[in-house]
Every structure is written in structure tokens, then in C-alpha cells.
Amino acid sequence: MKRRQFIQTATGTGIALSSALFPFAARAAANYNVIVVGGGMAGATVAKYLRLWSSNTLSVALIEKDASYTSNIMSNEVLTGKRASVSSLAYSYSTLSSKYGVNRLQGTVTEIDASNKTVTYATTTGNVVLSYDRLVLAPGLDFDLMPGMSSMSEYDSLVPHAWKAGPQTTLLRQQLLAMPDYQNVVITIPLAPYRCPPGPYERACVIADWLKRNKPNSKVIVLDANATIQAQAGNFQKAFDGAYGYRVDYRPGCTVSKLQLVAGAHSVTFTQNGVSQSVTAAVLNPIPPQRAPALLVDSGLVSGKFAPVNLLTYESTLQSAIHVIGDACISGMPKAGHIGNQEAKTCANAIVNVLKGSQYALAETAPVLNSACYTPLTSTKATWLSAVYQYSNGVMVPSTANGVTQPRAAAVASAGNYSDMEKWFKTLMSDTFA
Amino acid sequence: MNAFKKTRQMALGCIAAALSCSAFAVTATPESLSMAAGTSQTILLSNISGTISVYSSSSAVAKVSKVDDTTYQINGVKAGSVEIKFRDRKSYAKVKVKVTATAASTASAATPLNGRLLASNCFQCHGTNGTGGFDRLAGKSYSEIYGDLQEFASGKEDADGIMAAHAMGFTDEQLKAIASYFSSIR
């Protein structure tokens, strides 16, 4: 079985040919294979920087099931029509191939064999098995069903979470447009850690800002499982309280016990301060609890809900030669695209160092990870959040350099920040995909 | 598959070890290397039996640190020669390391820290390798970049701005390494 797969691989793809048929020659020339699984912010970045920082000497394959990536960042602006459609947030993998020589492979990874160092992925024409020297997993997240739901397909057809930008984002936009006035839009937030800490609050703000102009008698209700706002608390609270001409009904410490799904008239039952109550929702946007994908669980890479890693290298602490970056790993830092990009660079730097040797030391790096993100609070004003993390004794801790507390946020939402946000987004995506 | 893999490893071991072609002896790649003080290189081990103990004939010349079970990092400390042994349950592999003095450099060009990885924190907003988005950083002088970063880190310039927020999170040594990296890009 295994042998047959190997032969099939050898005849099927060029990358496997050299390592399967001529392993000695390939190794003597130090032609190491790195396979990256997942083409989001972290996966695309690591593929690019593995090639760039190895001076194109590492063979890098990027396996991703989708033809292109749709950015989660800025996708809340599709909900309000500020951005025309999710297709405006699509990023192709063609530059990674043409400019950096990343071998782009389309398919779904079905099995990781850590002891034989192989990955199996399914394509439209059958299974392919590839050997690796190092494997980097950047798989994103799986979403849980909310209480009372019966099927994941309900997120696609009835109550979009839209926490992975795509068709659900479009559906949520359509539901907001179709909703009559005098209704509730209900957003539920899961317990941290979840992807993009400020994201749910940003969504509440931009929808409320849009309702103000389009359905002025409707409101946004936020049911937050957390006891407090998880990022930029001061800026969001100010917005919720009316600083920008809209209000958000924000309710912390809410445990959702049941969603009752009725198109256009859902109800959410939840407990707050020990009291069970319900709200109705013409549009319901449940942001579900999140976890590392099943593939990682099946591969013995997960402890609890996410994958523990060595934060110098992002190598799994449970399986050698497998690295996990982005939202699926346990980094102690926010799960966010900008951070995934920098985790990817830290990982790429370590892998290049390990496989190729380098003037750049590994142990001495004591990685610093710097995050910036901008958040629109209205259609014209934005704030920002910045955090610098320093490596210390195996963990990433908010920096205390210069006696300054991290993270730090913009003092006020402004039009200047809004235009900086667009430049940040454009440059970040370019650093990741181009 | 398993037999295939084993053959491959044995043959690899022979290439790497060159001298003794025992299929079961631990092997280290490369067997010898030359490096400047203040830099580091990586040694990969294969065919390990049991756990590895590391012996260095002079840790004053080069220090060894473990990255993972099969990967060790050699850090050059000062000029000299040193022999490093990786011993497992059955055998040992030797690596000869020659450390040369740090290349003559101007004060501004010395890069004691990993400037590249540190500086890559700036790429998301200033472009890959600092080639632009917000201000272009590539090729600016060390003193200009370090001077700006110092002003931000000390709060002298735009203390409530996002650049101050970033710069304040880095140590002075790290800011110097970042400035050094960007000034070296042509």
C-alpha cells in the first residue's frame, strides 16, 4: 500500500520524483523538501520566506485546497457595503510561484505520517503522497456547533458565522440588507482564545454605524461569553456608549445555552449573572468557539484545543520535524493575521537555520514579535492596536522594554488612522502574498 | 517503505561519515566547519541510538546548544579550534570547528543580534525588506534609522503614535540590530 503510493507519487509529480527515486543524490546536494499545508496569512508567508531566506535553496511546496485566499481582515467592511464584495479580498498564489518558486499544489491534506515523514493529499485525480524533511502546518481553525444547532450547514444557509471570509460573509451582508427596520442583529462572542480578539467588537461597531443610516430603529446586541471586552476595551466601550453616533447593546459574561433557528426570527437563550433569558434576532451572527482542525488532532499534535509549539522554532512539542503556525498553535499571543505573518517568519528563519546553516543564530534570536492592527469603528474612522512580545523562558510575554506597558492603542478613532489602515492592509497582504 | 527508508539512511550515513561506514554509528553533518566568532551554525545528527551527550574541547572557543533531538547549534565565541563530540549509546561523531576572529567591521555594521528576523517585524507596514508601503527603510543610513527609532522609543517623537508604540517594545540593542539590517540592504 505504502509502496504503491510512493510509486504513484513518483510518476505524478516532479517534486516527489527526485526524493523518491534519487534520495542519495538529492540529499548529497542538500535539496531539502519543506511542505507547507494551508495558504492563509501564516502559510503563504512561511512559504515565501522559506524561499527568500534560503536564497531559493530549499524546495518548498504549498498545499492548499482553495484556488485563492480570501482575507478575513477587512471582511467586516463587506458586511456594510464599504467594500463591494468578498472577491475584492481575494489573493492569488501566483506570485508565490512565479517570483519565489514556491511549488503550489491544490488539494486537501488527508493524512500526516510523522514517523515516515510523509503527507497525503487528495486532488480531483486521486491521492498524492509527498515526503518532507520539515512540515509546516498553517491550517487555520475548525468551528464548533453552537448549542441547539444540528448541522454545520446551518452556518452556510441560515446563521452565518462569517468568521472565515467567503460565501458566509456575502450571506450575512444579504441578510442585513433584507432585514426590516425595528429589529435586532445579535452577535455572540465565544470565550477567548478565538481568532482576532478585536474582530467581533469591530463588527458590532461597523454594523451599528451602518444601521444608523439604513435601519435607524434597529440595534446590535452583543452577547459576549467573556467577562470583559477582549481588546481595545476603552475605544470599543466609548463607541458602544455613543461616541460615534450609534449605540451597541453590549452584554458581557453571557453563556449561550440555545439557539432556536427560524429564518428572520431566531431566538437566543443565554445566562447572564445566573439569570436565564432570551432575545430575538432578525439576523443572528453566532461566532462559534474555535479549535485546531481535526487533521492536527488525528496527527497527535494537539493538547486541549490547540497545538503546543516551541516558540523559538514553532516546532511541535509533540511531534518532531512538524511545525505549527498561525491560529492553530498555542503561542500565548492573539490569533490574528498580522501575528500569523510574523510567526511564519520566525518559523522560516528557524527552519532555514536548521537545514542550511546561517550566519543568523537561532538560540540568540530571542524572537520579538510585533503586532499592529487597525480597526474601523465607522465607515470613515479607525483606531489601532499595537503589541510587542518578547521571548522569555519559553513563552512570549508583552514587552516591558523602556518601562512601557504593552499593548498600546490609539487614543481616538480618526480619519487619519482610517487611511493608514488601508496602507497597512495593502502592505501586509503584499508582504504575505507578493 | 521501512526497508527503503533504512537503506536510504544507511547510505546517507556513509556519505556524511565518509570514514567509518558502520550503519549504526551516529553521524554528524557537517564534519568540519569554519565560522566567525559571534556567528552560529547548525549540526544535524542521524542514526542516533539512545540519547546524545555533547563534549566540547573548549567552550571558550565554541559553545553548543541543543535545538532538538537531531539538531544542535554551534555558537562561535572567540578565535581558535575546537573538537566537538556527539556521543550516543553506541558510538560518537566528531565535528571539527575552526572559529575565526570577528570580521573587521565599523561600529554601525556589527550585528550581534539577528537583525534580519527582528527587522522583519517592520516588513508588514514598510514592505518586504523595507522597500516601502509606509516609509522606505531599505538603504537608509544606520544613524538615521537608529536615531528615528530612539526618538520614538524615548517618547520624544509622537509619543502617542503607532511608531512609538512599536519602538518602545524593543530594547536598545534590538533597535540597533534593526537599524543595522536595513542600512545593509542595497
Image (cartoon, coloured by chain):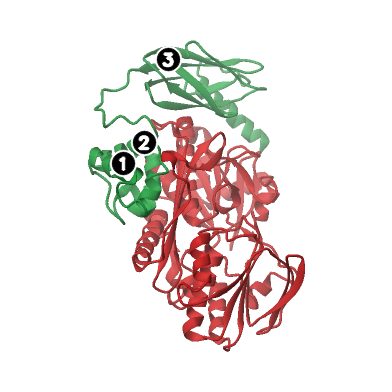
Chain colours: A red, B green
Q: Which residue is mark 2?
A: B172
Are the two marked residues, 3 and 2, in contact with CB atoms closer than 8 angstroms?
no
Disc 3 on helix, strand or loop? loop
Q: In this rendering, would B104 be left or right of A48?
A: left
- Mark 1 or mark 3, earlier in chain: 3
Of all chains, the one bearing label 3 is B
Q: Nearer the viewer, residue A183 or B128?
A: A183
Of all chains, the one bearing label 2 is B
> Against A319, is A428 above or below?
below
Q: Quadrant of residue A368?
A: top left
Query: Mark 2: which amino acid?
Result: Asp
Residue A291 locus on image (x, y percent): 65, 56
Determine if residue A127 is in view.
Answer: no
Are the two marked residues, 1 and 2, in contact with CB atoms closer than 8 angstroms?
yes
> Against A104, is A80 above or below?
below
Query: Mark 1: which amino acid?
Result: Gln
Label 3 CA crowd tier, 10 Å (few <14, some 14–19, many 20+): many
Determine if residue A136 is in view.
Answer: yes
Q: Residue furthest top?
A: B57
Q: Which mark is residue B15?
A: none
Name the residue at 46% across, 54% down: A338
Disc 2 on helix, strand or loop? helix
Q: Which residue is mark 3?
A: B61
Q: CA distance from mark 3 to mark 2?
A: 27 Å
Q: Which mark is residue B150?
A: 1
Q: Quadrant of residue A160?
A: bottom right
| Badges 1 and 3, same chain | yes
Of badges 3 and 2, nearer the viewer stands 2
Residue A1 locus on image (x, y percent): 70, 47
- Mark 3 or mark 2, earlier in chain: 3
